Image (tube, rainbow, N blue to C red):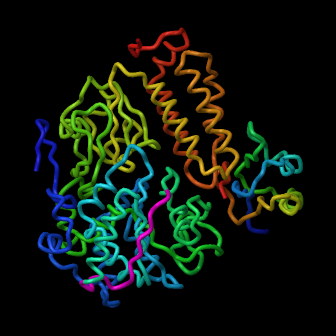
Amino acid sequence: MTAPVRLAVDLIACDGRGLCAELLPELITLDDWGYPLLSGRAVPAAQRGEASAAVQLCPRLALRLEAGAAGRTSGSG
Amino acid sequence: MTRSALGARTVSRLLPGDYADRTLARHLARHGNRPSCADPRRRDELIAEVERAGLTGRGGAGFPTAVKLRALAAAWPVPRVIANGVEGEPASDKDKVLLAVAPHLVLDGAAGAAELTGAREVVMVVHHSVREIVDHAVAERRAAGTDPVPVRVLTAADTFIAGEASAVVHWVERGVAAPTGRPPRLGGSGKRLGGGGKHGPGPALVQNVETLAHLALILRHGAAWFRSVGSPGEPGSMLITMAGAVRRPGVYEIETDTPVGGLIELAGGAAAPPGALLIGGYFGTWAEAAAALPLPFSSAGLAPVGASPGAGVIAVLPRTACGLAETARITRYLARSSAGQCGPCVFGLDAIAGQLERLAAGGGCDLTLVHRWLGQVRGACRHPDGTALMVASALRVFSAEADLHARGWCSEDRP
């Protein structure tokens, strides 16, 4: 079993393009201004691949995966 | 010493009675020489003494000073000590007053912290209004050979956000007074308060100037002396700024756990019957005056109204003034004070301020929407979070006023 990971976003880098929320609607929604709200829970094993893809496809390189099961839902950088 | 009818008293540890005491000669006459902390074999022992004293950061966050000292004593590369005298909070004056009347006490604390952590330099980041006083103090010490490491003075950027710890490091290292989202580095392995990556700025002890002044006295007189005033849980004295409707607004040095009502008496009493208090500053908590007046001024004591001392501000709002108008004004100020780096802070605080302005003016305001936004604002630093907590407390405390406004009334007497 692999160690739990969760998504985090660098809100200084984030521009609110919204790609991540389209790729991972189960884990990322958008706030009223179009910036990602992260669920804060560990990324389920079945979605690791999609999460990695979202991290790599972020046009601002603002999304990352980090170790840890739980975290703030706001996902400050 | 001043004592109020309720038994509240001022203490005089940090603040001398007289501006003339700010010279090096008068400082030494008052406090004696600074004991050296340079012996590396005594470092652990001295840091343990600071821990026993129970000194916590006086900039608002209240983090234990000994924990930072211990982490940085093991840091590589060698850290720098940054004395944070930015005080961008408009309601607070304590750091400016401290630097104006007792700059050498702060510099002694910075020198002690530098020895305890093996730091290579001290950087004083100070509000522009006290820059010349601090420059003069540093020159006096240079001539006397007082300090163990070089001391630099920088004028702080004159913005609210410039005092945030990562923004202070950013200012010192890159000349940019904006938060980085990376808390100041406490060690060589990328160890930070709150976690973080291993890249970025060098290790730094960022400490509020009042904290350093207390440290200077603990290194002279020990933990038991420090703990001999104030509450056992949050010991010592602290500087507070009394603002708003009090007869003698200004900075006072008090024992922790003094009842809030006693603090108002020390400040000459309320200038008008108080309705609500903003406790802790612009990131603080609104509380009904009647509920807050009997409570001891400490984190534990203020818990029943959800407040904490923060940076030591108490602003008194008269019963005849409109709390919603004041909240809208402060929220707009905070929205304008965003560093402008994170979208949810830029757009969220502006949107919340806009709704509160409509509410204050008696126009239509969607409070459900405001509450939704209070849960959505966030960013790389605590600026949006602090603002949201203040606004949430206002909506609790001024809910009756909000109902009045919804019906086109306001309790404030308007011409």
Q: Position of residue B360 (x, y in %)?
A: 52, 21
Question: Which residues lie in the magenta part?
Answer: B144-157
In magenta stretch: residue B148? yes
Relative to B327, is B191 on the left or the right? right
Against B12, is B222 above or below?
below
In magenta stretch: residue B314? no
Q: Position of residue A50 (x, y in %)?
A: 89, 57
Against B25, is A17 above or below?
above
Against B342, is B285 above or below?
above
Relative to B226, is B279 on the left or the right? right
Q: Quadrant of residue B137?
A: bottom left
Q: Nearer the viewer, residue B247 or B356?
A: B247
Relative to B290, is A62 on the left or the right? right
Against B163, is A35 above or below?
above
Q: Position of residue B299 (x, y in %)?
A: 35, 48
Q: Quadrant of the C terminus of chain B?
A: top left
Q: Nearer the viewer, residue B399 or A65?
A: B399
Relative to B282, is B235 on the left or the right? left
User: How many labels were placed on the picture?
Assistant: 0
Q: Position of residue B375 (x, y in %)?
A: 63, 38
Residue depicted at x 75% and y 54%? A14
Residue depicted at x 23% and y 36%? B264
Residue depicted at x 45% and y 29%? B326
Q: Quadrant of residue B51?
A: bottom left
